Image: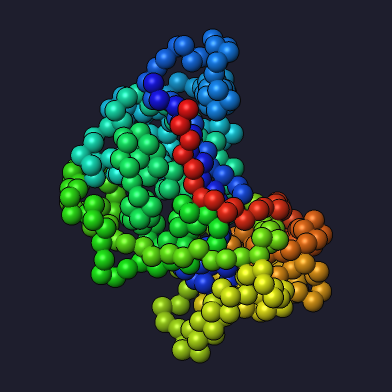
């Protein structure tokens, strides 16, 4: 039997001017607790020699069994076909699909496995998902699911994927790497997709093409593109205060409002600020004013403001000069979450953001505010 845990952080993309390029890893997590095969010797309470990691994992499995409902026949048939079963903690059953070919985590895992001509999990695999990343809120929930799916296939089938391989597989399901890259490697990252380079595994692995939703976005042979990234040095005093409106905003809708063409002065405006922002993040000679002003944007936020009541107010009313500790504020990814980067006075800034959103909402939605760390290390797979 094999026991392992996969931990993937949430992320915030863009950081103002860095549209589809910059991303930051945050301390809210998607956790997979995975058991492959059966071994009654490791049931909770059967042995005092169980490690803390094993005990945590088995306790999560036990917790998942408390509210377990009978599965529909189609879902049970897919579980049997692919040798896996999905369960979710702290999530209404109808919120996410449990069929392996429709759930994003296992879709991705099956895709990666088929790339290596593996049709199903090698042993019966129980996957318990415990997710604290809000769905469709601009905090990288889809990216975390995609990354966890690649890591699940890697761990279950001993694929020994490199970081480049993991980034390449993620790109098949999410066409820009600003969220997936920091979720994989941690910290603050800048990344881009190579136009003319593919990964070496593309040349030796052939994907089986069959009529299955797990193979969406795929061709008979999928050449995995190479992603280049750098980790950006940053002031470790920075934390992220995130205001999360209690309504969903799809990435598709948020992208649909963007123009097809941009004026050159808007492009130059963002390029100038990205260059300064990357340098301003460092601890040495850190300036709240410089970081705040370099996080301004003309590429996406002006066109998305109407989708998030309160966003304009937060960006316009909260400044480095009237809000001590504030170093920058922007829309998080496609929204509706708004993120403020701060070095102090986190609670006061959180209260100010919530007050602005509560006023703008006119009682139509609530807003949750969290204070998160920037996660220096990215995704982790731990075997027990």
Where residue 4 sits: x, y (%)? 46, 31
Q: Quadrant of the N terminus?
A: top left
Q: Is residue 359 visible?
A: no
Count of numbered labels shown in the rendering? 0
The correct choice, above or below, for 59 with respect to 102 in the image is above
Asked whether 303 or 193 is in front, the reply is 193
Where residue 152 sits: x, y (%)? 39, 38
The correct choice, above or below, for 134 with respect to 226 in the image is above
Instruction: Check the image and name the residue furthest to the front.
Output: 284
Quadrant in the rendering for residue 238: bottom right
Tell whether 76 sits left or right of 55: left
Tell whether 114 sits left or right of 109: left
Q: Is residue 172 visible?
A: yes
Point 45% across, 57% down: residue: 181
Quadrant in the rendering for residue 83: top left
Point 60% across, 60% down: residue: 336
Where residue 63 sits: x, y (%)? 57, 23
Where residue 5 sits: x, y (%)? 49, 34
Asked whether 290 or 20 is in front, the reply is 290
Tell whether 23 sits left or right of 221: right
Point 25% across, 61% down: residue: 198
Point 44% across, 43% down: residue: 148
Report the coloring of the rendering: rainbow
The correct choice, above or below, for 199 with respect to 3 in the image is below
């Amino acid at each position: 039997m094999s026991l392992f845990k996969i931990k993937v952080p949430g992320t915030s993309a863009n950081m103002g001017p860095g549209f589809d390029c910059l991303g930051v890893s945050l301390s809210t997590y998607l956790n997979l607790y995975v058991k492959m095969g059966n071994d009654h010797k490791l049931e909770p309470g059967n042995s005092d020699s169980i490690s803390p990691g094993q005990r945590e994992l088995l306790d999560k499995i036990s917790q998942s069994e408390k509210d377990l409902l009978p599965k529909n026949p189609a879902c049970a048939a897919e579980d049997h076909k692919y040798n896996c079963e999905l369960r979710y903690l702290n999530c209404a059953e109808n919120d996410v699909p449990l069929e392996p070919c429709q759930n994003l985590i296992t879709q991705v895992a099956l895709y990666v496995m088929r790339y290596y001509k593996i049709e199903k999990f090698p042993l019966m695999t129980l996957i318990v998902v415990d997710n604290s990343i809000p769905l469709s809120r601009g905090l990288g929930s889809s990216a975390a699911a995609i990354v966890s799916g690649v890591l699940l296939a890697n761990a279950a089938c001993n694929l020994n994927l490199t970081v480049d391989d993991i980034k390449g597989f993620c790109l098949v399901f999410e066409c820009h790497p600003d969220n997936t890259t920091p979720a994989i490697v941690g910290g603050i990252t800048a990344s881009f997709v190579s136009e003319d380079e593919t990964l070496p595994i593309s040349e030796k692995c052939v994907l089986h093409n069959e009529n299955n939703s797990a193979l969406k976005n795929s061709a008979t042979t999928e050449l995995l593109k190479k992603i280049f990234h750098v980790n950006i040095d940053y002031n470790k005093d920075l934390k992220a205060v995130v205001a999360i409106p209690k309504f969903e905003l799809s990435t598709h809708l948020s992208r649909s409002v963007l123009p097809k063409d941009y004026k050159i002065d808007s492009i130059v405006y963002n390029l100038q600020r990205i260059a300064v922002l990357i340098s301003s993040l460092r601890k040495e000679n850190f300036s709240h004013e410089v970081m705040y002003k370099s996080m301004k944007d003309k590429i996406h936020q002006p066109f998305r403001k109407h989708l998030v009541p309160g966003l304009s107010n937060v960006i316009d009313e909260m400044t480095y000069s009237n809000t001590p500790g504030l170093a920058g504020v922007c829309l998080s990814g496609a929204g509706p979450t708004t993120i403020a980067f701060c070095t102090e006075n986190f609670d006061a800034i959180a209260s100010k953001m919530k007050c602005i959103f509560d006023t703008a909402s006119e009682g139509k939605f609530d807003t949750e505010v969290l204070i998160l760390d920037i996660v220096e290390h990215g995704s982790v797979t731990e075997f027990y």
